[in-house]
Image (cartoon, helix red, strand yellow):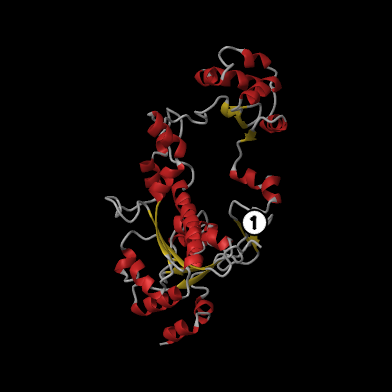
Amino acid sequence: MTDLLCGIRILDLTNVLAGPYCAYQLALLGADVIKVETPQGGDLARQLGASPELNRAGMGASFLAQNAGKRSVALDLKQQADRERFLDLVASADALVENFRPGVMDRLELGHARLKEVRPSLVYCAISGFGQTGPMRDNPAYDQIIQGLSGIMSITGTPETAPLRVGYPVADTLGGLVGAFAIAAALVKQKTTGEGAFLDVSMLECTLSALGWPVSNYLTADVEPQPMGNENMTAAPSGAFRTGDGLLNIAANKQEQFVTLCRLIGRPELASDVRFAERETRKQNRIALKALIEDALASDSAAAWEETFNRAGVPAGRVLTIPQILQERQVIERGMTARFPAVSGMDQPLTVVRGGFMVDGEAPLPSRPPPGLGEHMDEVFAGLPPRARKRAKA
């Protein structure tokens, strides 16, 4: 019941992260995602990751992260014969996603206008750093570049350490999520009207859109966002606090939560202290308040305080490492990972993470492991419709 996109075919011409992550979300929902890769090494992510052995095998950890559930064909789109085979694939597809620089597909004579001649109802999604128009359209764009241009880095870190890069490719990931959302929406229109769509996804714009609160504070209140480290500009006490063992995030954003917090740490008088009694005064005196709270928290561990606070309705959570969160019961019981005992190019089982939602109580999981380069050539082309198969043989 999790195959919401069963019967939908997506052609994935993308590389590295934003595009592959987009297509991975669609594969998790049951779409038949065919990854179209160059025979000369395929997706660059096949060579990226922490394991040199996997990189040499063309199954780098970066590739494994967002390509499960897909099939792979190898086509050199600079060659006329392979372009014709690609058009046969397009004739069978519902949607296509690519993340080349603007104009690359047109130079290959495979742009949106050409593909519409083959498949008028095609949903075509182009993910790029800056979009298909504008003075920056031709600039090369990596996640780091977008993070810096978008303003994310300017508000990440403390006043002393900012600007800082977010610790994972957040702009790439946002571009992929928005692309998947847009494709799914366009497919609804396609199935109801028979019309396709051209989707122009800009990583810069996706990132700015996700910066809703900081951007809004500037546009509506003329307040320029500033780096605040682990503090929350909208409330106090709300941030990361030292305990007797470990760091603890606390978000006592409501008045009743703050009063409860003060009681639980054995400092009920703080709730009536003129410096902290009201929301705005707490924000103005957040440094002094944090010091008093941390002094009380030193009596126990982050894990113990987390349980105490949450039981009383005060939002709290330990600051964990990635290995730690993957071992948490919450993650394990909801089936956040899928395990494949055998994977092409690997001599050990593979575990990957799924998407961030469930369908009717079930976790959408990839149906197959990440593919080897060109692994499904025979399978894919043998399964083309009769007209396309005839053209491919010609």
Residue at (63% x, 59% y) in the render: 364
Where the C terminus falls, by quadrant? bottom left
**Viewer-proximal residue among 345 and 20:** 20
**Viewer-proximal residue among 42 and 270:** 270
Q: Is residue 153 above or below residue 356?
A: above
Q: Position of residue 24 (x, y in %)?
A: 53, 60
The kind of secondary structure element at disc 1 is loop
Q: Position of residue 245 (x, y in %)?
A: 66, 30
User: What count of labels does the image hold?
Assistant: 1
Residue at (64% x, 47% y) in the render: 326
Compared across the picture, whether 83 is left or right of 246 comes to left
Q: Is residue 272 visible?
A: yes
Compared across the picture, whether 188 is left or right of 98 comes to right
Disc 1 target residue: 359
Residue type beneath disc 1 = Val
Outermost residue toward the left? 135
**Viewer-proximal residue among 322 and 177:** 177
The quadrant where residue 133 appears: bottom left
Q: Is residue 298 visible?
A: no
Outermost residue toward the top? 274
Q: Position of residue 246 (x, y in %)?
A: 63, 31
